[in-house]
Structures are given as structure tokens and as C-alpha cells.
Amino acid sequence: MSSTAPTATPSREQRRPLRGRLGRGRFHRGWRQALADTAYILSGFALATAWWVLLVTLISLGAGMAVTLVGLPILAATIYLWTKIAETERWRARGLLGLEVASPYRPIEAGSLLARVFAPRVVWERMKDPAVWRDLVYLLLVFFPLAIATFCIALTAWAVAVGLVAQPFYYWTGAGLWLQFGATHRIDTLPEALASFVLGVALLVALPWILGLLVAVHGWTVRALLGPRSSERVEQLTRQRTEAVDAAVAERRRIERDLHDGAQQRLTALAMDLGRARAKLDSDPEAARELVEQAHEEAKQALAELRNLARGIHPAILTDRGLDAALSALAAKSPVPVEISVEIPERPSPAIESTAYFVVAEALTNAAKHGAATRLRVRVWKHGGTLIVEVHDDGLGGARLEPGGGLEGLTTRVATVDGTLSISSPEGGPTIVRAELPCAS
């Protein structure tokens, strides 16, 4: 394995984000995208106002009460809250604009929700992360004024375009449109109404360009402030490479241990039994026959262990028939009833497919062995350029990331393909393991 440090090579879309949003691919997608752009702008105006009021109120309250120490937990909760709000904005950009923005935060190990919000060590680590403060700059200083400006422009463009197109109707009903260009003028003749109609149609045709320009500016600010910087990306890739190397070494040691403790021991016993049988073949045929039968059983058990070991490395059914069939085979062997739902139009890359399989396999194993679950539900679907894997069980909950544990290994495996793994497992259940894997078409 090469030890060359990874470099952050941006994609073509990342190298020219604004021009890519303003090119032919942006403006020739028709009215469906124009409506999505409008929904993004309108919802952005409402959310930007709500986020601004909420954050200003909480920050002012926490800072004002900090001298009494009551404000410190409020400020800690506010910091956590605005990172989640920023995640919402990344999700909105991905869902409505098709803009993939990776999470830029440094990994922080924490247990329960209270620890993730209020633990002093976690709060301090979060405060040292520059991405957290870029979130605040975006939400308070950039998103709010930008949302107001784009909302006013988009609403005006829609209103003027629709109003001009409707002028023939107004003319026939006797209600004309009043326009003011230095002096007030009322459109009350048929030529003026028809000219207004033509102008309105032209404005409607231009609306996708206008809306595309507005959301392109939004997309540029989202990527610039809510996405990872180049240095952060290099650091993240370096960390992922190190974790991948460690995971590969640990996997190799596990395979060596399983071979030594399992199949190798059985094959050694098989050779010894066959040697003893050969020695007794002439003097004691009956004992030799029993030894051969024993060796036959050892051979079958060794084959079964080798088959299970190979399945743990990469199941053949996954390569031959894909994720749906492989997960169905997992469900058939599970001691707990499992409901499988796989909705992907085409097979992802082998690395993503394998990662999704082992996420489900580990989650099913944990739920059956430790969670006391009585029912499991597995959903796999594709949203935009992301393959989402979600495993839900009705067990006791309390699943945690522990050093050397299976969930930590899953987190490392998912991170090596630039994905994210989240676990929601309150005491008493339910437990939800969710992996988001990049799967761009």
C-alpha cells in the first residue's frame, strides 16, 4: 500500500462552482428546476429569518447570563444548535439544488446527547473548530441578508411576469394595470395589453436564468462557508488514509487469527487422522474406517469455516447478484425477523456496495446479540448523489461507539469511502444506524 499522502483534488464542479451553476447545465433544465429554485428561495427567506432571530436571542441571553454561570450551558447548547442548523442548510442545498457539500467538522468522540451538547471537553473541541465559526458567520451575516435580497428579486420577477401575461385578461374585463415610469400610465388599449403579454412571456422564459443566478449565489456561499476548506480536506483525507491502513492491518490480523484458530487447526487434525488411518489400514480396518469418517467430518467443518471466513471478507452473492440479494441472504440467516427494502435504480460502485453490506451486517449482528431486538427494518435508497443505508431495531438501545468495537470499525470503514455514520440509540430504544455514502451518478 502506498504511503504517499493524499491530496485534495477538487472535482470540476468544485473548481468552478459559480460558473457551473450558471452554465447550460443549470439553465436548460426547464420549469421543474425553476420551481425547485423558487422553493429554495422562498423557504430560505422564512428559515433565514427564523434562524437569525433564534440565534441572536440565544446568544444574547447566554452572554448576558454568563456571569451567573447559567448562561454557559445556554451558550454551549447554542453552539451545538447552530451546527445542526448548518447541517439543515447543507441538506436543503442538496435536496433542492443538487449541491453536494461535505460536512467540514473535525470528529469529536462523545456518548449521549447530553455529552455531545454540554460536556466541557466536547464544547471546547467544538469551539476550536474553524468550521463551527464559519457556520455562525454564514447564518448571521451572510444567509439572512442574502435571503432577503433574493426573496425580493424572485418575488418581484414572478409578480411582474405573471401580471404582464395577464394583461389581455385585465383588458377584456375592463381592469387595466397601472404602471409608473416617471408618470403614471394605465394600460387600457388592446395593443398595449398584447405588448405587455409578449413582454411577460419573455420574462417568464427568462425566469429560469434569473432564478438560477440567484440560487447560484446561494450555492457559492454555502460551499464557501459551510463546506470544508482545502487544508481541512487534506487533513480529513490524511486521517481517513491512516484509519484505512489501520483497519486493513486489523482485518489482516483477524483473518490470520481465524485461519490459525479455526481452519488450520481442523486441517491439522484432519492430516493426523488420515495418517493414523493409513497406519491402521492393514492391521485394524474398522478403526481406520472410523478415523476416515472422523477426518471427513473435520474436512466438512474446515470447509464451512473457510466459507464463512471468505464471506466475511467479501460475500460472493454481493458480487454476483448485488446488494438486494446479499441483504436478503443476511435477513434469511438472522435469528430476528428482518424487513428489507432496497430502492436503488442501479448498482453502486463495488466499494460503496461492500460498505453498505457490512454496515447492515454489523448492525443486524449487534441488534440480535446485544440489543434484544424482536424486529428489524433495513432500508436502502438513493437520494441525489448519496446512498443512504438505515437499520432500525426495536431493542433496548444504549449502543455506543467504543474503542475496538464493531461500531467504531464501521465508522472507520464508512469514512474510508468519504461517507458518514450516525447512531441514535437512547436507553430503552429504538436504535437507528444510518450511513450516508457518496454515490454520484
Image (tube, helix red, strand yellow):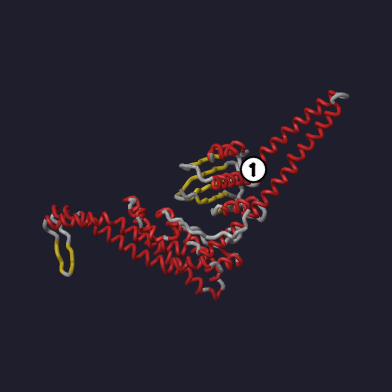
Foreground of the two, 374 or 28: 28
> x and y percent of residue 380 in the render?
51, 44
Looking at the image, is 245 positioned above or below residue 372? below
Tell me if mark 1 has few (under 14), some (14-19) or many (20+) residues whose alpha carbon lies within 10 angstroms of its own. few
Q: Answer with left or right where residue 395 lies relative to residue 186.
A: right
Outermost residue, right side: 283
Foreground of the two, 56 or 16: 16
Task: Report the label total.
Answer: 1
Foreground of the two, 339 or 36: 36
Residue occupying the point 65% across, 44% down: 369
Q: Answer with left or right where residue 313 lies relative to residue 226.
A: right
Residue occupying the point 64% across, 50% down: 406
> x and y percent of residue 73 in the render?
55, 68
> x and y percent of residue 34 in the render?
33, 54
Q: Quadrant of residue 92?
A: bottom left
Looking at the image, is 297 positioned above or below residue 407? above
Looking at the image, is 202 positioned above or below residue 148? above
Residue holding disc 1: 312
Can residue 210 be seen in this snapshot? yes
Outermost residue, left side: 189
As helix, strand or loop, the secondary structure at mark 1 comes to helix
Residue occupying the point 61% across, 66% down: 121
Residue occupying the point 51% across, 71% down: 62
> x and y percent of residue 253 in the render?
70, 49
Can residue 393 be seen in this snapshot? no
Looking at the rendered structure, the kind of residue marked 1 is Gly
